[in-house]
Amino acid sequence: MRATIGGRTVGYDAIGNGEPLLFLHGFPLHRRMWAPQLAALSPRAHCIAPDIRGFGESTPEPPFTMDQYADDAIALLDTLGVSDPVVVCGLSMGGYIAFALWRRHSTRVRALILADTRATADTPEGRRNRAALIETARSQGSAAIARLHGPTLLSERTLERNPETLDVVRAMIAAQSSDAIIGASEAMLERPDSTPTLGTISVPTLVVVGANDGVTPPPVAETMQRAIPGSRLERLPLAGHLSNLERPAAFNGVVAEFLSSLS
Ligand code: MLT
């Protein structure tokens, strides 16, 4: 589906009934990465999955910042008439956006699911890697990012046993505009350290991490979870960074259990 908000096109899926559940995708993917969750959870939740500004079907128009992405998500909820607080489920970059959403719009947040993400800002090495990725996107486009970056998001086991998952991920990345990839990379480079935010989180929070996540490994998730009052951590065996795509049934199971614990 598409909406026009502030003159820009926003691609989104919205399906199901029940508790509103907002899915924020990772980089450099789009809303379809949540297809297994929408299929499994829509019988019990109103699942809303936007394309972050620039990705998928959403117009690649600056500014690109975590704050803007968070405001965009709220603008979509407003357009859809969703005024009740939502459960926000963000994976990796989606988690960075979830932190901004909490800081800026906490009254709209019923609970948080932080999957395969980190609170800290980029390290010097992370900044160098990001600058290299921006250069590749500029000079070679999204197909090169799909080829080089795609496999780093998945566990060895997924690459060996479910190579079609890599095909799906690469197709999503290759379909992106370079502007979206560069804009989001610069936004992530500039994002603040969200560590001070963790202690302010006062809604139920579930942290999820793939046991074989090489991008935001389990110790990162453990440190983050310990700093969020009353939060829980679920490790998904055999999953890498895209735990929702690599172990969809396990991911859906822990999310469904978390939703039940809210009511
Ligand atoms: C993601 O999956 O969204 C990325 O790994 C986030 C990042 O590059 O920091």
Image (cartoon, rainbow, N blue to C red):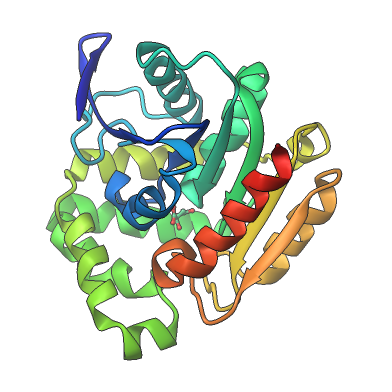
Residue 125 at least partly seen: no
- Provide residue 131's location: percent of width, then percent of height: 38, 53
Q: Is residue 110 above or below residue 44?
A: above
- Provide residue 120's location: percent of width, then percent of height: 66, 49
Whether residue 221 sits left or right of residue 70 in the image: it is right
Residue 69 at least partly seen: yes
Whether residue 42 sits left or right of residue 103 in the image: it is left
Choose between 61 and 126: the one closer to the eye: 61
Choose between 261 and 154: the one closer to the eye: 261
Whether residue 2 sits left or right of residue 253 in the image: it is left
- Provide residue 242's location: percent of width, then percent of height: 44, 64
Residue lying at 43% horizontally and 32% vertically, measured from the top left: 17
Choose between 215 and 261: the one closer to the eye: 261
Q: Is residue 4 above or below residue 251?
A: above
Q: Quadrant of ligand 1?
A: bottom left
Residue lying at 56% horizontally and 59% vertically, measured from the top left: 116
User: Residue 3 is drawn in which quadrant?
Assistant: top left
